[in-house]
Amino acid sequence: MSIALTVLAPLFGALLAPLAIRSGRNVCAATAGAAAFFSFCLLLSHAPAVYRGEVIRETIDWVPQLGLTFSFFIDGLGLFFAALILGIGLLIIVYARYYLSRDDPMGRFYAFLLLFQSAMLGVALSDNVLLLLVFWEVTSLSSFLLIGYWRHLPEGRQGARMALVVTGGGGLLLIAGALMLGHIAGSYEISEILQRGDIIKAHPLYAPTLLLILAGAFTKSAQFPFHFWLPHAMAAPTPVSAYLHSATMVKAGVFLLARLWPALAGTDLWTLIVAPVGLVTMLVGAWIAIFKDDLKGLLAFSTVSHLGMMTMLLGFGTPIAAVVAMFHMLNHATFKAALFMSAGIVDHEAGTRDVRRLGGLLRLMPISAALAMLAAGSMAGLPLLNGFLSKEMMLEAAAGTDLGGVPYLVPVLATLAAVFSVAYSARMAIHTYLGPVRDDYPHHPHDPPVGMWGPVAVLVALVVAIGLVPTLAGPVVARTSMAVIGTDALPYYSLAIWHGLTPALFMSALAFAVGAVMLKRHEGLSHWHASLPRPDAKRMFDATVSGLIAVSRGVTHRLHTGSLQRYMAVILVTVVAIGATAFLAAFQAGGHAPGGRGTLPANLPAIAVWGMLMATCAAVVVVHRNRLLTLILTSVAGLVVSLAFLQFSAPDLALTQISVEVVTTILLLLALNLMPRRSEAVESLRRRLGGGLVAVATGAGVGALAYAVMTRDISSISQYHLGQSKPGGGGTNVVNVILVDFRGFDTFGEIIVLGIAALAIAAMLQSALRGASARRLDAMRPGVESADAHPLLLVVATRVLLPLALTVGVYIFLRGHNEPGGGFIAGLIVAIALIMQYVASGYGWAASRARLDARGMIGAGILIAGMTGIGALVFGAPFLSTSYDYFHLPLIGEFELATAMAFDLGVFLTVVGTVMLALVEIARIQRRAERERVPEGPMDVLLHSDADPPGERSPNAAASERNEV
């Protein structure tokens, strides 16, 4: 569990940080830091074994039938990337404590940051490609929250949306590619996929699989032409920019390329796609960075360039290039995080990030300036700093690479990118920190508290230490590179300051010379650059999104005409067509053809019930314009179906059917009270004939499919459930055991859908209290059909029976594992008892006393059910596995306790919350229409009267309407 806990520890911190803020900002930051530090310690505890050459694995079954397991492993690459995530993350947590103002919600910030950190750790340490995809998508969602943290800034919201659309779209392509990769390899375990590289590369699906995976990696790591989202993400707070763009999100794509390098690299297709994309990205990012006046914008495009450099190196497909890529990933993380935090310090202290308004800061904030200039020197590749080492190795690898048969293309373009790197790095250092002190800073700058420059100093210390003593990074680079290449036999390389008079040295010297000239001529170059026509990526993105929205609106306008008849026709015809196709295909193929299994003889009661059902359905067709009568007949049909369940010895299903019919009938009666009692006959004969044909075809088709399914000569899984219900699930009620144990994952998904449906119903009904609908409600006169809206006898009966009904609900819930009942039926019974209080005594009286949080009940139910499944993982069992045992207590005797009861409790709460939420929203509309007042006494019953004229409501009624159940 140690690896899983390493991944999940920041997630627990994300839950605690918003609570800790109540005790102060320091406690909140300490809580977040403690979670990250604990995870870091767990990770480092595996370092000795990893550096001995071991691979630490941990597997917890989740849904093994789908190939989805909680599989984690720590090798050199995973340890390296996770250490960057946690190490720099700790520094960012400290930095953010002093960067964020008192107006910024710090608890929310740390919650988002730790959620993102946990997701990135999952990406780094997952050994299952499906699990990696889950964490990959969580990184996109959590980064969206981080980038848009300052909600009041339009550019923040726009940048967050752009990042989510681009990376989320790439994530969808990655899902397809990962599924194809697992199919080709015959396994979704990454450690097994890496061992089957030859099989994967020789497979006919290798090319489309590679393209899909590269699309996901390129969008995540801002490779050309998807680079435009990253600079717009600079609207985020500087701690977010420093974290996302140095060690985490933008490196996730590069990490994926490195992780899958043994399985996918080494082919011409890989080299001809990955290397040119990286090379172009390196050039484009560096060129644009030269002309950026905003410090964070300059650093953003420099990040794009360096990501392109790492991608290009991995694209070369040679082991030595992979080694250089990993070394530069380490160096880039250190100096780029330091530079982003330095830019934040300048903005925080001087009030601007505009290079044109800065200069002379070395005299005013010497500590921060010295640290930033050292980091900028490393970014430029200045000797005796770590960036110089990896830049020299990159140029050396480029000098020996031919791409597309052009021998000098790569070294020339790599040198040009190095020239640009020197120019923008020198501009940042010189134009920001050197020169005379100005007198027009927005704020008078000075060195910030040590909490802000301290994290920068830690990173710069690494920059200098590795630059002076490169062998310090030797073990890290070696073990990481072994994991990337997939072998312990590394190519020869030397981490040294001096390699002699090599081509790379002359290329680097040329870069410094030309870069210095470009900096001197920067003003003229800027005017020339401004005169060049260039595409506006943001405008193109916005136009694309607007075009897609316009197309979707057009399609929606054509398909969503508001005709329920047309909707039902499309759905039913599609279902019948698909079913008929499958039926005919199975019939022609033989094997499990219909008619192979005998049918049960029909006795007289069954024939009578069948005839009653047919008559009821026919009556619905005849009287369907009378809505009340149609509802009653529909309920009768449902009750008849419950008799069919009893006929086949399924009392649990019969109870469920009856309970559902009662609940839906009452809710629909309340809704129909606000609608005309009859619908007008406006359909033409042609339309009715069309509807009749669809109905006949659907009925015949569904009947044929039902007959085909039930008469197939195929073994049923029901015997397994019957035989294993008691020994496997600990219960004799097979239906309940199936719901909470054998098919618990299905049930969990169903209650989530049920909760979502309840929220959707509430949202739609709430719209009736606004706009034109609200005006129509205010214009309605209270109903006068009954002189006694709340009969006293009904009021007294429902209140007396309420404790009994709740007791019955508890009894049905507790017996559900062994007798007909369970959480679903018990939830419906309790909901019926509560509904009757509203119907009998009125919404105002019931709402003022019940005070149930329906939304909270839905959330609590889903949470309890989910935590039950997670609890199984803690004990090494698959997700939602159940356990039971027998206990003995005096006076009570022996009884059974099963973990399935907790899951059933989640079902119970979700059902009650769903029904009550729908009731609340319908009742609010009803009260708006009838202007119901809140009774004062416990047995007071409000009788409708003309006390409130139409369109007016008493203050009590208006106040009561705001009550939430």
Image: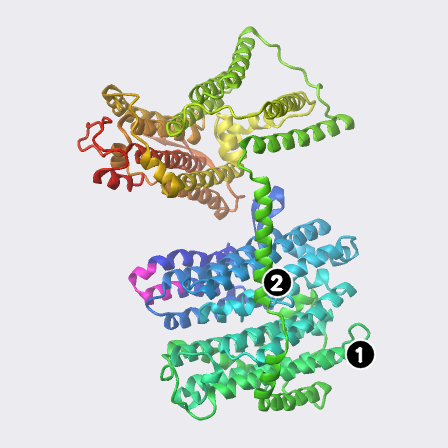
Q: CA distance from mark 2 to mark 1?
A: 29 Å
Residue 194, picture quadrant: bottom right
Q: Circle 2 is placed at which residue position?
A: 219
Magenta highlight: main SS: helix
- Neighbor class of circle 2 (other Cα within 10 Å; few <14, some 14-19, many 20+) is many
Residue extending farthest right: 405
Residue at 35% over, 29% down: 830
Q: Amino acid at mark 1?
A: Pro
Give x and y (percent) for residue 150.
Answer: 42, 64
Give, as a single range, the part of the protein colored magenta: 20-32
Q: Which of 802 and 195 lies nearest the eye of the viewer?
A: 802
Quadrant for the C terminus in the image: top left
Q: Which residue is mark 1?
A: 407
Of badges 2 and 1, nearer the viewer stands: 2
Res 895 visible:
no
Q: Residue furthest top?
A: 604
The image position of residue 629, as x and y in percent, is 44, 19
